[in-house]
Amino acid sequence: MNQETVLDLVREIEKVMVEEQAEYVNSFAAALYVACVSANSLGMTKETFLANCETLFDHDKKEQMKELQ
């Protein structure tokens, strides 16, 4: 996984959502749909997908806590 490419894609997706004035609930649903379709295309199992989600969720929470300090 190329971290720079991933961040570029996230920024592009974020830009589209801002331009479309998407509400958080719709942004979440769209992002989750893209994640599910991508996971299925990669042949991930449900368990692997959920483990990746948990890792990313925990990482983001840690980053948020760092920003608050």
Image (cartoon, rainbow, N blue to C red):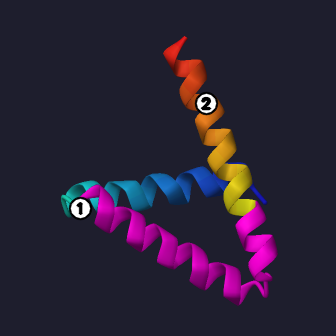
Kindly identify the amino acid type of the residue bearing the numbered disc 2: Glu
Q: Residues within 10 Å of mark 1 (few under 14, many from 20)?
A: some
Closer to us: 7 or 67: 67
Q: Which residues are magenta?
A: 22-51
Q: Which image quadrant for residue 5?
A: bottom right
Residue 19 placement, left or right of 16? left
Kindly identify the amino acid type of the residue bearing the numbered disc 1: Ala
From the image, tell me which residue sits under label 1. Answer: 22
Can you say which quadrant of the picture contains the N terminus?
Answer: bottom right
Q: Position of residue 29 (x, y in %)?
A: 40, 71
- Please check the rendered image and state whether residue 43 is part of the magenta-colored stretch, yes or no: yes
Q: Residue at x 80, y 75 (%)?
A: 47
Q: Position of residue 9 (x, y in %)?
A: 53, 60
Q: Position of residue 67 (x, y in %)?
A: 53, 20
Closer to us: 46 or 17: 46
- Please check the rendered image and state whether residue 25 is part of the magenta-colored stretch, yes or no: yes
Q: Which image quadrant for residue 16?
A: bottom left
From the image, tell me which residue sits under label 2. Answer: 63
Q: Disc 1 and disc 2: Cα gap in Å?
A: 24 Å
Mark positioned earlier in the residue sequence (1 or 2): 1
Q: Which mark is residue 44?
A: none
Q: Position of residue 46 (x, y in %)?
A: 75, 80
